Amino acid sequence: MRKEIAQFLQTGQEAIARIRVEHVIREQNTWAAYEILELFCEFLLARVPIIETQRECPTDLREAIATIIFAAPRCSDVPDLLHIKNLFTTKYGKEFVSAMSELRPDSGVNRTIIEKLSVSPPSGELKLKVLKGIAQEYNLEWDSSDAEAELTKRHEDLLQIGGEAGYSQTPSNQNSVEPSNYNVAPAIAPKKVQQEPQQVQVSKPLTKAPLCGASEVQPSLKDVNYAVPVVDAKREMIPQTSDILEKARAAIAAAERASANARVAAGLATAKFERQSS
């Protein structure tokens, strides 16, 4: 792959070389991840007796176990990692394994493995660096100025280009909306004309004089029919409350008389008991 990229650079096909270099970077990242995973596997192999004796995941082995669990589905070329992941699932539970796979807080997965196995495309600076390394490796006299201008282009420049394209489309959108507005206007106008006579007829009996200030609003309020029932309801509530108070006082007096009679009866009963006992 590197030799093919060198040929593309030599023949001036930089666009194809910029695409192919992503495959080279991905292969480099995969091999770097495999080297780290190999070290973690050897580390866990030496600690198998500790893993068997302890029910929970040991703290000093958490990074190695979490990294293998995270990398297992992302390294399809090594099916043995999936087998190891299933063993850890049986021992520590599905919740433990899902926390590592989803990169939850304090999961303990190695940061380098996360970067190397990431599916996001490499940055323009990294692609330019690899292209220069390939050109130097095959002793090519390659002018990288065009590639630098293309790969180091900022996102703001791309947004400006997209914004200008969006502004150029706005006049056509406005023109497409205007005919619909003209079609709707005739349907709305007759409704407003029909409603105006109704509003004038209702307002005549309510207002006796033109509205010029706040003081002129009071006569119109006197003519409203629902103001009288409210006053009558308040007047009707006053005798009802007085009747309730009188009934309460009568009940209290009756209770006091009953308690007095009970005390007198208790006194007579004790006196009779004393006479019988003597």
Image: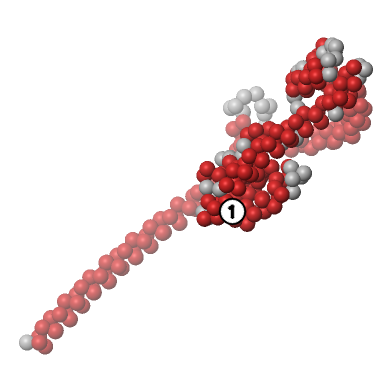
Residue 151 appearing in the image: no
Q: Quadrant of the C terminus?
A: bottom left
**Residue 220 image point, x, y percent:** 63, 35
Q: Residue at x 73, y 42 (%)?
A: 74
Q: Amino acid at mark 1?
A: Tyr
Q: Quadrant of the N terminus?
A: top right
Q: Residue at x 23, y 74 (%)?
A: 262
Question: What coloring was used for the rendering?
Answer: secondary structure
**Residue 232 image point, x, y percent:** 53, 49
Picture quadrant of residue 183 = top right
Picture quadrant of residue 215 = top right
Residue 136 appearing in the image: yes
Toward the left, the furthest residue is 278
* Figure disc tally: 1
- Using the image as rendered, state which of residue 235 and residue 87 is in the foreground: 87
Secondary element under disc 1, as helix, strand or loop, is: helix
In the displayed structure, does residue 53 sit left or right of residue 255? right
User: Tag 1: Cα neighbours inside 10 Å, few (<14), some, or many (≥20)?
Assistant: some
Q: Residue at x 65, y 33 (%)?
A: 112
In the displayed structure, does residue 172 sit left or right of residue 84? right
Picture quadrant of residue 217 = top right
Say which residue label 1 marks. 92
**Residue 78 image point, x, y percent:** 74, 45
Task: Work out whether 188 lies above or below 83.
Answer: above
- Using the image as rendered, state which of residue 126 and residue 225 is in the foreground: 126
- Using the image as rendered, state which of residue 220 and residue 67 is in the foreground: 67
Q: Residue at x 71, y 36 (%)?
A: 117
In the displayed structure, does residue 61 sit left or right of residue 72? left
